Amino acid sequence: MESNALALIDPTTKHQRNPPGAISPDVVPSASQLRRAFPIMNIATISSGFEKGDFLVREEKGQRVYFDFFEEAFNYIAYKGYIRMTGEDEKEWMDTMNNVHASVKGGMKYNTGKLLMVLYKPLLSDDERDFAN
């Protein structure tokens, strides 16, 4: 007599376990897992090629500050807690910004300069802020 206990398993499909540490596609990640994987952050950029100053720092809320020397621009933004992005992330952001600027029909109204560096500052969530205090 054949058991009905295995009737739900299709013998024609290959059942493979996920490798250790892999997340099943059926599992929805929690908010904290998503924040760790995709942290909330502000970005800032350093660009060159402007009349007011040789280097421009663009940061949160559209604030723009001009500098005559790169070191001054870098020190200014680093002091505010920004960190340079890793190579792949920085390249992706640069490509994105260049594509956005190139997509404007007739060109950008203002000089966008040459993008030199992309930096980020991780932001604490409300839970992390409460824990830090």
Image (tube, grey):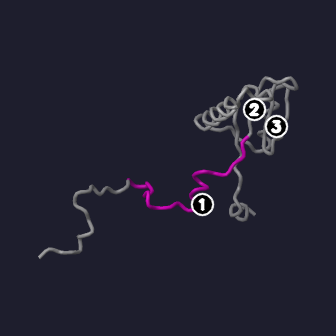
**Residue 48 horizontal/vertical position (percent):** 77, 25
Whichever of callouts 2 and 1 sits on the residue coming sooner in the sequence is 1
Which kind of residue does numbered mark 1 sit on? Ser
> Residue placed at 79% from the left, 37% from the top?
58
4 on left or right of 62: left
Q: CB under 8 Å between callouts 2 and 1?
A: no
Q: Secondary structure at mark 3?
A: helix
Task: Measure how far apart labels 1 and 3 are at the Cα level.
Answer: 31 Å
Local packing at callout 3 (Cα closer than 10 Å; few below 14, some 14-19, many 20+) is some
Tell me if residue 39 is in the magenta stretch. yes
Q: Secondary structure at mark 1?
A: helix
**Residue 8 horizontal/vertical position (percent):** 27, 69
Q: How many marks?
A: 3
Whichever of callouts 3 and 2 sits on the residue coming sooner in the sequence is 2
Query: Which numbered marker is on residue 46?
Result: 2
Q: Answer above or below: position of 3 versus 82.
A: below
Which kind of residue does numbered mark 2 sit on? Ile
Q: Of discs 3 and 2, which sits in the foreground? A: 2
Q: Read off the residue under disc 3.
A: 76
Which corner quadrant of the image does residue 50 belong to?
A: top right
> Residue placed at 11% from the left, 76% from the top?
1
Main SS category, magenta section: loop
Q: Read off the residue under disc 1.
A: 32
Q: Residue furthest front?
A: 105
Q: Residue furthest bottom?
A: 1
Task: Measure how far apart labels 3 and 2 are at the Cα level.
Answer: 11 Å
Local packing at callout 2 (Cα closer than 10 Å; few below 14, some 14-19, many 20+) is many
Q: CB under 8 Å between callouts 1 and 3?
A: no
Which corner quadrant of the image does residue 66 belong to?
A: top right
Tell me if residue 123 is in the magenta stretch. no
- Which residues, given as a range, are shown in magenta? 19-43
